[in-house]
Amino acid sequence: MNTKAIELEPKRAFGQGYCSNVGLELATNEVAELTLVMKALADPVRMQIVDVLRRYAGEVCVCDLQDLFPISQPTLSHHLKKLRQAGIVGVERREQWAYYYVIPEALEELSAWLSWTAPSESTAECCSPAAQATCCEPSEKATCCGAAARGDTCGCSAGA
């Protein structure tokens, strides 16, 4: 009895995904920067410190922070140092006191990354690398893929 094997999955090239064409989008340096910020914010006390500094939108004296948390002064200094190293907070020293503030740009990149939404299905189809070869004119690729990244309708002549 000679039976033929059924091929359930087509042969794929090395690195080709199974269900869709997936790939890394974040550059290594972007991953390192985002990870540094996320690690710093992963501690509950640090998260509360940033929340206090963010809500007061100015400089907060370390003496005022000390009264808010049931931790020792060296521990508070350690948390503030970690937040400074991550670039989340800055400090200005005036005589014997240190005044801390949030650096908004440090949180904007994280916020943008967290709020990213996938392009709509029709836009994604048009702007996929495979479709670009037939869909987009070379001069339209940036517009088309820029629209896809924002979740807007594709701007190329074939996708419009």
Image (cartoon, rainbow, N blue to C red):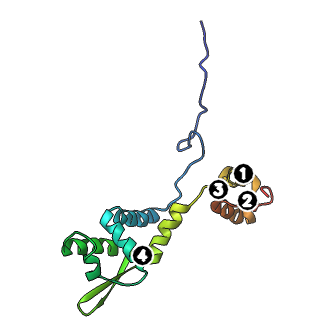
Residue 25 image position (x, y, % from top left): 53, 58
Residue extending farthest to the front is 67
- Callout in the foreground (4, 2): 4
- Asked if the residue under mark 1 is in contact with the one under mark 3, i.e. CB atoms within 8 Å, the reply is no
Q: What amino acid type is highlighted by mark number 3? A: Pro
- Asked if the residue under mark 2 is in contact with the one under mark 1, i.e. CB atoms within 8 Å, the reply is yes
Residue 154 image position (x, y, % from top left): 73, 59
Neighbours of disc 3 within 10 Å: few (<14), some (14-19), many (20+): some
Q: Write down the quadrant of residue 53 in the picture.
A: bottom left
Task: Provide the residue designation for mark 2.
Answer: 154
- Asked if the residue under mark 1 is in contact with the one under mark 4, i.e. CB atoms within 8 Å, the reply is no
Residue 54's tag is 4
The tag earlier along the polypeptide, 4 or 2, is 4
Q: Residue at x 49, y 69 (%)?
A: 109
Neighbours of disc 2 within 10 Å: few (<14), some (14-19), many (20+): many
In the displayed structure image, the side of residue 100 where residue 96 appears, left or right:
left
Q: Could you give the CA–CA distance between mark 1 and mark 2, rounded to whole angstroms? A: 8 Å
Q: Could you give the CA–CA distance between mark 2 and mark 3, rounded to whole angstroms? A: 9 Å
